[in-house]
Image (tube, rainbow, N blue to C red):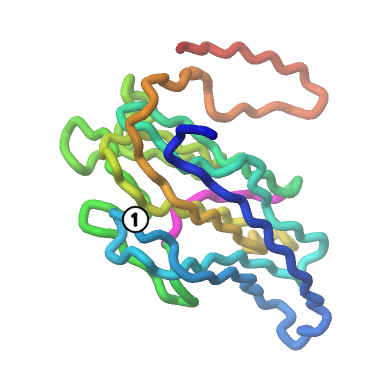
Amino acid sequence: NSNYNYGFEAHHYRGRVNFENYSEYNGCLFQIFFHKSERSSNITNLNTEEDDLYNFALINPWVANISSPQFSEDPKILYNINQSVYLNDGVIGQTGDSLVFNWGIPFSNYNSAITYKSNFSPAKFLSTYCPAGNNCSANPDATIPEGLFLNQENGEFIFTPIGNNETSTRVLEVEQWRDINGTKTLVGKVRRDVLAITISENSNNSPTITVNDTYNICAGQKFNLNLDIKD
């Protein structure tokens, strides 16, 4: 009986692959994909609206004990305009692996990329606050965050949406790297491909936390952290 204008469903799909049946491809990365029709008829920031949704993960099953990174947080779909966003998809990887985060390209089929309209791109999927114009360097530390910032080490993204009633696609790619015999090797990749919709229905700004992004500590070392939180 909610009066809220939006509703979302979560669908979970499972499958099983026995890579022993593909031993002739030893050393190759496998692409595990999902393909369905019609992303959305309301997309405004891509050049086409009702393209298929094609998303995939890469895995190298020939490397021992490989487990793909996991998204521990539900995806953010709705963004209130003029309210700064400080988010993280909560990606968790295996101990010892290095994760690299990048914005990705949406696909409608294998090797069939979907392009963004002028002034938009994978790294600018929504209109963001830029005091100097449409395009500016990301500044996540500004009082009002400028541009669209992505921390490639931990996946945090920060921006201030300003365009009302925009519907776009946000694709986050997470590469999984492992040191194998002294060589950094790409052993997997996962992607999150979701809608991003701007609304103007909530005037509650998110709290901000002022703290360093990275800390280096040793095992067994006592670690204290003070957070400066403002709301």
Instruction: Please state the extent of the stretch shown in magenta in the rendering.
Output: 97-105
Q: Residue 158 in the image: x percent, y percent?
A: 42, 34
Residue sitting at 36 percent across and 27 percent down?
A: 83
Residue 139 visible: no
Q: Which residue is mark 1?
A: 42
Residue 204, position as x, y percentages in the image: 41, 19
Please report the residue visible at 27 percent of the width from the left and 53 percent of the height from the top.
120
In this rendering, position of residue 166 left or right of residue 90: left
Where in the figure is residue 58, as x and y percent of width and height?
Answer: 62, 67
Q: Nearer the viewer, residue 17 or 185?
A: 17
Q: Eyeballing the image, is 200 above or below 173?
A: above
Q: Where is residue 8 shown, x and y percent of the image?
A: 53, 46
Magenta span: chief secondary structure: strand
Q: Is residue 65 left or right of residue 27?
A: right
Q: Residue at horizontal 42%, vertical 31%?
A: 85
Instruction: Name which residue type carries label 1.
Output: Asn
Element marked by disc 1: loop
229, 78: nearer the viewer:
78
Residue 101 is covered by the magenta coloring: yes
